[in-house]
Structure formats: C-alpha cells, structure tokens
Amino acid sequence: MFIEEKHNYKSFEPKLYLSSPTMHGEELLYMKDAFDKNWMTTIGENIDATEEILQKKIGVNYGVGLCTGTSALHMAMKLAGVKPGDKVFCSDLTFAATVNPVVYEGATPVFIDSEYDTWNMDPTALRKAFEIYPDVKVIVLAHLYGTPAKLDEIQKIADEHGAIIIEDAAESLGATYKGKQTGSFGRFGCISFNGNKIITGTSGGMLLTNEEWAAKKVKKWSTQSRDDAPWYQHEELGYNYRMSNVIAGVVRGQLPYLEEHIAQKKAIYERYKEGFKDLPVTMNPFDSENSEPNYWLSCLLIDNEGMCRYAQSENFAAFTQEHHKSCPTEILEAMLKYKAEGRPIWKPMHMQPIYRNHPFVTREGSGRDISDAYLPGEKKGKDGRPLDVGADIFRRGLCLPSDNKLTPQQQDILIDIVRNCFE
C-alpha cells in the first residue's frame, strides 16, 4: 500500500492495543490479602470495600458486586419485572451485552435510533417509540464510549409514560452529566470491570440502586437464591453471579486511579482532535455544557465528502483508494500494518443478524423499511438529515487506539498514519 512506499515507519513493539488494563501494584496487594486470609470466594473484605467505595463515588445507596456487567444488566431486568412477551426500549448503537439480557427474560428489544450530538439514544426517536408502543415500561440506555446521553430529556419522556430507566454505564464509569455520575440516574445502574474498561478487575460488574429491597434481592439471586434455612433451600430461580473476592481486590486496587485514567484518556482524545483538525473528520462528540465524558475510547467520524468509495457486506468491507479521501477500513488496515489496534464502531443492534427482525424506531417513526431498502445515510428525513443515524455512524466511524499508556510520540505516529490515508 502507498503508506509503506512513502513512509519508513516501524511496527510498534509491543503492539498498541485499543484499551488494555493499566496496573499499579495495589491490585496485587489486595489479591494477596485475599489469598493470605483464604477468602478465595464470593465474600470478603475486598468485595465489601469495593461496593462501599463505588456507592460513595457514584452517589447511590447500594452497590452489589457481580461477576460481569452483563450479569448486572440481567439482574436489572429481573428487578424491573421484565417478563416474556414484554417490549423493552433499548439503545441501538451499542454492544450486544446491553440488549441480550432483555432476551434472557423472554422480552423483545425495540431499538431506538441514535442522534449525532452524542451518538446515544435519540430523545425524539424515543418519544416517537412511545407513540407506537405506549405500554412499554422499561428503557435500557447505554452511554456510548463513555459519553453521557441526553439524560434530562430522556428522563422527562420516561416520567411522562411511567417508565423506568436502566442505565448501562459499563463504558462510562467516572463520566458525569450536570455534575452527577452516570449510573446514578436510572432506577438501576450497571457498570463493568471487563479487561478493556477504564477500571478493570479482568472481569466483574456492579448493580447500582438506591433501593434496599433491590440490593437484597440481587444478592440473593446472584448466590443461587439460597433461602435463610439451615439447609440448601430454594424458593426461586437463582444464578451464580456474585463477584469473586479476588477479582474485587483488583478493582479495589484500581479505583484510586480512576481520575488519573480519565485525565490520560482525555489528553489522548484532545491530541487526536488537534492532530486531525484540518482533515475531513470529527471526533466522537459530547455535550460540553452539561456533560464530561470519561473519554474511554477516542473515535473518528469521517465527513461524507471525505469518504472514498466504500461498500460493506455482512462480513466484509471493500474500498477504492481516492486522493484526499479515506474510509474506516482503509485507516484500520493502515494502523494494523504497524501493529496498532483500532476497531469499527459498534454495529447497530437493528443491523445484527440475530436482531434484524426486531422493531427499530427513528425520529420519524418505524425505521425497519429504511434499513432494509437503503444504504446507510442514504434515506433522508424531513429535516434533510439521514435517518438511521446509527447505521450512518457505523459506516463512517472507527475507534482509535485509546490505551492510557499511549505515549505522545506513539500517538504522533498514529496521527501521521491516519493523515496519510487522506493524501
């Protein structure tokens, strides 16, 4: 390819990852403490301390440590009373883990399109969805890539219809909206400590709530619903979802560094933004007046006029090189040659083979005919902007290497690699 012919870059050694764990040392001390005290189980000081720290940090009354963020979302569905045959409004531009727990309970996800201001659930589309499905009582809202959604508007719509919000804050730990932490707005909030998150335990998650009954219920459900009896007795279905005391030790050791990690991620975002300022691209946006992201991933959206000829099938993408234009696949392939890991934007849920027959709502109503009959960004609404916003962002966007160990020198090379794609 032309980049190799014109530039004498060397491959990154070691490989640059999208977002890898950053350890500090305290994690090992807490893990060793669990080992030394033989609390290699799902109870112990690390779990208690981690729950207490996060309750105070996020501003909720209760936090229940669980084995994954997905298990926290599943527990939230059960707390919300989601049952077979129900419909649940869900963010469309997100990872499948946001949506799958709805299906675990036999309900049907109804996907709500995104908006360009934050890439999150569009309040206008949500309002339209309630016109179509007025009986829905649960909204699952994700904060994409660590950027808070338009929480005031979405909460107002939910209140008007007597619906509750379950916040998927898996990607947004430490992000704030009007000074308040994400994960504390919904009736139930869920966070993740997966290995790529801004705070990691290698795995793990937490259910957040202000309601004592809910916390008690999740603690019971997550430990196989064992009853208070001198023998193993069970009156309801249980799950093996409780967090390990060892994993909690890793999270406990990580938590003092949350603000440091956010500051590092923010510096990476701003360095990319400055490096790309004269290219036909924009960074993933946020509401600077009301919110402060945690900058978990820095993402790039190529302007329509900056896109080269580009086509996507179900499992493949192809492009034609053009002067002063590029596309996500070209940029990702260029970075990968030098052992730098980027990723496509999440493929919207309504485009996923498993969910393509589920309802999908845009700001102008049912959008299923749009996604079936038009290329992303091709169908325009009454305001002249594309409908199926999530599909358009997916087509034109990519996630850049955002590891908080990324050095300015490494990032300068990455910026140069991207810029050369537009030569």
Image: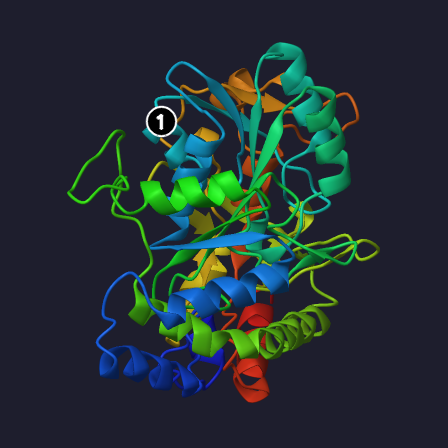
Residue at the location (50% across, 24% down)? 88
Front residue of 30/5: it is: 30
Residue located at (57% from left, 59% from top): 55
Q: Is residue 378 above or below residue 214?
A: above
Q: Which residue lies most toward the right here?
A: 289
List the residue tagged with mark 1.
105
Q: Is residue 119 above or below residue 121?
A: below
x, y percent for residue 292: 72, 61
Secondary structure, mark 1, is: loop
Judge left or right: residue 275 versus residue 235: right
Instruction: Give amino acid for label 1.
Output: Glu
Could you tell me which quadrant the C terminus lies in? bottom right
Picture layout, residue 105 above or below residue 151: above
Residue 348 appears left or right of 294? left
Q: Residue at x 24, y 64 (%)?
A: 41
The answer to whether residue 281 is left or right of residue 78 is right
Is residue 317 something that shows in the picture?
A: no
Residue extending farthest to the left is 231
Displayed quadrant of residue 206: bottom left
Front-lying residue, 120 or 225: 225
Judged left or right of residue 22, residue 423 is: right
Q: Position of residue 47 (x, y in %)?
A: 39, 65
User: In the rendered image of this protein, does residue 204 appear above or below residue 382?
Assistant: below
Report the front residue among 332 and 349: 349
Q: Quadrant of residue 67?
A: bottom left
What residue is shown at x 50% (from left), y 54% (from top)?
63
Measured from the top left, where is residue 318 in percent x and y?
41, 47
Q: Residue furthest front?
A: 230
Closer to us: 52 or 235: 235
Q: Position of residue 352 (x, y in %)?
A: 39, 33
